[in-house]
Image: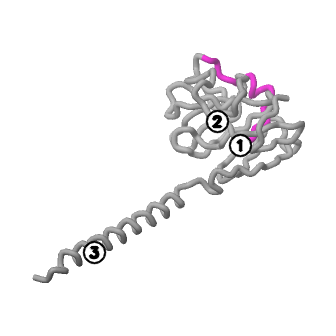
């Protein structure tokens, strides 16, 4: 038996292990790139002219790879807001929204609601159900996958698949301009 055999064996095993670790590292990097959010954590601001959205209408847009819904609430939608007893989290203690937003209508301005247009359980697209369109429900948002319901403030009803209110993206409203990705200045 050759004296160099154990040394060669160790060298071969070491080289194969280094190759295996390099392959695992490369595959991990590839997978993390596939499942990361488009654009990473960079949130470029987007301005939207609110004058083009009439009362009672909504505008859908895409911002940083996510769907956003801007709703111009009218008086009928405010009257259709659910009673606290019907909601899972009426005080919005467990939801995701910008720091400092505490109004029950969940917006910086009462007539405007800005939410990610995705259900909070499976991320399904939302549809708007006008007030009075369905018997036994005042209307609001419904997800297209499991039919989960939210009121016109984006608060989830009790007994729904989702257990969190709709997420509100960082934004501010400056006159008749919505600026997504901007911090609210307290005005």
Image: magenta residue range? 70-84
Residue located at (53% from left, 60% from top): 34
- Going from N to C along the chain, the mark reached first, 1 or 2, is 1
Q: Quadrant of residue 183?
A: top right
Give x and y (percent) for residue 167.
63, 37
User: Where 138 falls versus 13 (above or below)?
Assistant: above
Front-lying residue, 57 or 65: 65
Magenta region includes residue 71 = yes
Which residue is labeled 1 in the image?
69
Quarter placement of the C terminus: top right
- Going from N to C along the chain, the mark reached first, 2 or 3, is 3
Which residue is labeled 3 in the image?
11
Which residue is labeled 2 in the image?
141
Asked whether disc 1 touches disc 2, contact meaning CB atoms under 8 Å apart, the reply is yes
Residue located at (74% from left, 22% from top): 79
Front-lying residue, 77 or 31: 31
Give x and y (percent) for residue 80.
70, 24
- As helix, strand or loop, the secondary structure at mark 1 comes to strand
- Check the image and name the residue furthest to the left: 1
């Amino acid at each position: 038996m050759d004296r160099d055999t154990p040394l060669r064996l160790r060298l071969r095993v070491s080289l194969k292990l280094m190759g295996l670790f390099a392959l695992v590292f490369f595959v991990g990097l590839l997978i993390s790139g596939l499942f990361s959010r488009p654009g990473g954590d960079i949130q470029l601001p987007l301005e939207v002219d609110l004058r083009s959205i009439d009362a009672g209408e909504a505008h859908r847009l895409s911002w940083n790879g996510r769907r956003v819904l801007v709703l111009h609430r009218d008086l009928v939608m405010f009257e259709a807001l659910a009673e606290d007893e019907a909601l899972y989290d009426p005080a919005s203690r467990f939801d995701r929204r910008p720091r400092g937003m505490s109004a029950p209508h969940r917006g910086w301005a009462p007539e405007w609601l800005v939410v990610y247009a995705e259900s909070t359980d499976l991320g399904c697209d939302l549809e708007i159900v006008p007030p009075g369109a369905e018997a036994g429900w005042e209307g609001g948002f419904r997800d297209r996958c499991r039919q989960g319901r939210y009121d016109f403030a984006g608060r989830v009803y009790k007994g729904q698949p989702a257990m969190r209110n709709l997420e509100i993206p960082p934004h501010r409203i400056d006159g008749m301009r919505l600026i997504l990705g901007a911090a609210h200045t307290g005005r």
